[in-house]
Amino acid sequence: MIVPSYRDRSSATAAPRVPRRAATAHRVSTAAVMAAMLLAGCGTGTPGAAAPHSSDPGLSPAPSSAVPSSLRADPAATAAATPATTSATATSATPAACTNSSKLAGWSNRRLAMLTISVPVSETSVADATSEVSAGAGGVVLFGSKAPADLGSRLTTLKSHVPGHLGLLVMTDEEGGGIQRMANLVGDLPWAAYMGAHWTPAQIQQNVAKVATRMAANQVNMNLAPVVDVDGRNEAPSKTNPDGWRSFSGNTSVVSKAGVAYMNGMRDGGVIPVVKHFPGLGGSTYNSDFGPARTLPWSTLQKVAIPPFTAAIKAGAPAIMIANNIVPGLGTNPASLSPTAINSELRGKLGFKGLVVTDSLSAKAISGAGFSVPAAAVQALRSGADMVLFDLGGNVGSQTTAIATAITNAVTGKHLARSRLIDAAGHVLAVRHVNLCS
């Protein structure tokens, strides 16, 4: 995400033979056993996350003992089957394979909605997000400029509140240069512009991997970087220019190679990289955090800005962030709210199958387009995004509640397909390597 302020820093065995007289009985017995095994299905998967209260008076969770067991775990499949034992020709239907989607289909809309929300929290007081995490939020975004020495233990405690112990995405902006949240714990990286101009791809990957290793050791498992926007302007990011030194280069080829190197460095250190900001902010008219903004025309972006994203996707990018800028030639809504940008271009033509996250829906470009944060969250999910982000400020609990309510109401009112919500939740679990059937 684009941070609201910047600070200057300089800078991943034969079967035993069966006697002929017993052959038929043996086959019958074997068939019966196999039928029983198949009919057992996959209902013994790991329980899912707890559901928030159906009345939703707020996000403060009741003690687990006060929550009905039906809300605390997905019940295992209980269908029983009696295998045939008297005929070798008896047959039985093979049950559908267990998948995350089939398990998620049993979750309530509220539980699914919460999994698509990443909650902002100060890195100096991560316990503030305990209620939201206990209610099933899919992630948290750390804000700040200096992390406490015991951040890792604090985050470990926070993760212990995740319903069903299904994991939590802990995100931060650790790009380099002036966009670093925890350099005091993980070490410095220079601005991307410096890396692109002075380091080889191998050096970028090696240096980033060192930082990522320390991030993972401190329980941060997702970095909202690298920036693969193509923008060669030699200036600090500002209200009028969201990139500047945040970009590796104004040369598409350099950005493609550097972006993949940075991404691979994060993965080498055990951190999930988020490639941003699709479809490219280089040359934007304004910084979308502060007001409506447009990218260069789509015809230009296809030649100049899309190749780095294509390279990242071919290299296995696990997650991509969508910009809040309007893209001339792709519609009148910000890209983060555009099915053309996300479904048609990113998912369709580029074939991206990973997690799609929005840039902050608190951006003035979103309100300037006529959307509140909850309404934007619904539109983003309808458009193909999987996880929504918003800024720290105001009452985070109330904002989270409003977003979750808007999403559940949209499903109930048929404005958001339940299948789309299940798909989004599935992408959140997939990027965390969570298997509900194991």
Image (cartoon, rainbow, N blue to C red):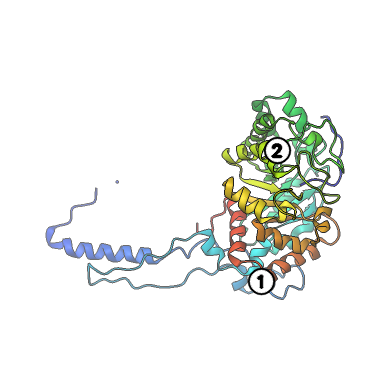
Callout 1 touching callout 2 (CB < 8 Å): no
Q: Which element is circle 2 on?
A: loop
Q: Residue at x 69, y 47 (%)?
A: 321
In the rendered structure, find residue 228 and report the number of the disc placed on it: 2
> In the displayed structure, would residue 140 be above or below residue 231?
below
Q: Position of residue 183 (x, y in %)?
A: 79, 37
Label disc, if present, on residue 346 of the rendered structure: none
Q: Residue at x 80, y 43 (%)?
A: 147
Residue under label 1, please give it: 65
Amino acid bearing label 1: Ser
Residue appearing at x 80%, y 33% in the figure:
245
Residue 12 seen in the figure: no
Q: Quadrant of residue 179?
A: top right
Percent of width and height locating residue 353? 57, 49
Picture quarter containing residue 275?
Answer: top right
Q: Secondary structure at mark 1?
A: helix
| Residue located farthest toward the left when viewing the structure as drawn | 21
For badge 2, the amino acid type reads Val
The answer to whether 183 appears left or right of 412 in the picture is right
Front residue of this view, candidates 353 and 434: 353
Residue at 70% x, 58% y: name it.
380
In x, y percent, where is residue 115?
Answer: 66, 60
Q: Position of residue 90 (x, y in %)?
A: 26, 69
- Seen from the viewer's position, the closer of residues 277 and 23 is 277
Q: Quadrant of residue 130?
A: bottom right
Instruction: Identify the mark nearer the N-term, 1 or 2.
Output: 1
Q: Badge 1: how crowded within 10 Å, few (<14), some, or many (20+)?
A: few
